[in-house]
Structure formats: C-alpha cells, structure tokens
Image (tube, rainbow, N blue to C red):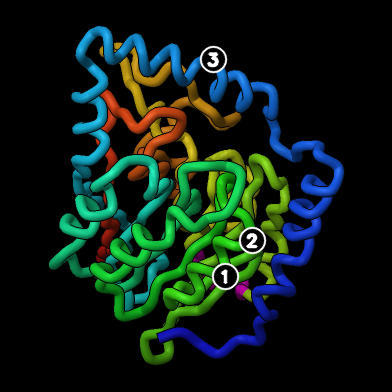
Amino acid sequence: MFTGLERRPTAQKLARRAAIERRAERTGKSFRRHPGRHALERVFLKPLLKAALQSTGLYARGVRNATSPVIRNLSLQFPDLPAAFDGFRILHLSDLHIDCVEHLADAVADSLAGLDADVCLMTGDYRFAIEGACDASWAGMRRVLSNVTAPDGVYAILGNHDPCEMAEGLESMNVEMLINDSVELRRGRSSIWIAGTDDSYDYRFDDLPAAMSQIPPSGFKVLLAHTPDAYRSAYEADVHLYLCGHTHAGQIRLPFIGSVIQNSEAPRAYTHGYWNHHGMHGYTSAGIGASMLPVRFNCPPEIVVIELRRTQTR
C-alpha cells in the first residue's frame, strides 16, 4: 500500500511543462534538443533506411524482432533494504512507443499475462510520434495495462515523446504519475520510496531535489528517470536503485560493436542493461517499442522484472 502524502494535483505539477508546449505551439520554435536531426530523420534517413532494409529483405525480419518481447529477470541485493521488502518484485516497462507497429500491444500484453509483480514502474515514452495528439496510443496502452498484475500500483514518469496529454490519459487508466515527486510504499512499519523526475532530454524539466524532498535521508530510494544521464546526482542523493530507458540500447546492435548511437551523455556501460555506480544499482532498459523505424536487430524489446533482496548478514 502507499501512504497518503501531501501531493500536488497533476495539473499543477505539469504547469511548467504545459507552458513549454504552449510556447512552442505559439512561436513555432521547437523546444527539442535536436530539432534539425528530427527533421532530417523524418524526411531523409527514415525513408532511406527503410528502403535499404526492404531491398535486402531485412525489414520484415526487423519488424518481427520488434514485436517479439523477451522477459529479463534480475535479482539485486541491498544491505539496507527493509526486511519486509525482501523478495519485492518490480515490473519495469520503458519506451513502449506502443503505436509504433501493429500487434506490438498484443504481444506485450500476452507476455505480461500471468507475470506477477508487486509494483509496476514505467519510465516514459508511451507513443511513437513526438508531435500531435496521443490518440493513436490509447488503445495500445489500455491493452498493455489490462494485463499488468501489480497490487502496489502502477507508477510512471513522462519521457521526451510524451506531452502533458499523456499524463492525463494514463491517470485515467489508474496510473499514478510522478512529476518530480515521490510516493511511499509500506509494509507494516517499513517502507520504500519511489521517486520520479520529469524528462531531462527535451523538456529539461527534471528536478531531482524536488522529487526527493519528502523522502527521509534513511529511506530506501528507487528513482525513475527517463535517461541514465543523472546517475551522478542520483548517487549523491543516496538513491539505491536507478531505473531508466530512452536509449533503446541502440535498437540496432552490431556484432562485437554493440550500439552505434548512444543517445545519452552517460558512460557507454550505463546505456544498456544492468550497471553499478559506486554501489548504486542501475538498469537502463532496452525498451519495448522503437523509434524512427519499427525494427530491431540483436536488441529485442524487453520486459524487466527486478527482485529486491536483502543482503544476508552473519
């Protein structure tokens, strides 16, 4: 269960984000970090890459790969995890981009069926596009969430693809949005805290101090961030587990080389899978959906289940 902390209404938490969107709409000036690159990808790179993959017969295989999610199971040990949470299971979903390709939502929902977790945590990017309304993503998100089993609830942050409209839509599906704030999950007298920061990539509206402000220094802290870039600040804030996505682990990974594009300022080792920063555990999900083209190679979409274990001491 979670505690009834003093929490601001979502509309209030989104006020600055909404102002960014309105300003861009009014002035026609993009707030994106790389607006020119997005235009280049849409007009030139996307059709060129698609044509190249189709001509070699690889496009259909890439789409099949992109609609074949795998389940990653991870067990992490913490010396200061409250005993009541030993064995606590987190379902981590990231970068669903759920409308990027037909049948993805069904494939993910089928993979989630019968998968038990205590809480579901989502780290942003629920739609494929970066502009326009979110209408195309609603049916897919409902389909996915209908198969999530998480008695302690579903908590989410926004990514750089997600406008304010996304937060409102997800809340209508019983998702608790964390916009630079936190929530406490309790087991009797013990608790852990889930904190969430807003997007630091395009919106640049992340506020880690605000997200951590209600958490006692001794509290066990799980941080949701869209990118791995805030790993230093999270470590300094005594975060125990850092969950993120955004990078898609490259989406197309080459043999022996891995991903060509990191899309992050974090060290390469922190942009894919499990990592550890001076004792702070981190996981950067390869995500579920895809960007630019709905293809994946050597990088399957992943659903991550993390079990928290208390380190045994003599």
**CB within 8 Å, label 1 to label 3:** no
Write down the residue under mark 3: 44
- Residue drawn at (65%, 64%) of the image: 180
Q: Residue lying furthest left in this view?
A: 114
Image: 312 above or below 7: above
x and y percentages locating residue 147 in the rendered image? 24, 68
Residue 238: horizontal and vertical position, in percent? Answer: 57, 57
How busy is the neighbourhood of tag 1: few (under 14 within 10 Å), some, or many (20 plus)? some
Amino acid at the residue labelled 2: Cys
Q: Which percent across, then down, holds residue 140?
A: 34, 58
Which residues make up the magenta segment? 215-221
Q: Is residue 109 above or below residue 272?
A: below
Q: How many marks?
A: 3
Q: CA distance from mark 3 to mark 2?
A: 29 Å
Q: Nearer the viewer, residue 297 or 24?
A: 24
Say which label, 3 or 2, has the lower sequence index.
3
Q: Are marks 3 and 2 in contact (CB under 8 Å)?
A: no
Viewer-nearest of discs 1 and 3:
3
Q: Give residue 227's mark.
A: none
Say which amino acid is labelled 1: Glu
- Which residue in the structure is indicated by mark 2? 164
Amino acid type of the residue that numbered disc 3 sits on in the rendered structure: Phe
Residue 219 magenta-highlighted: yes
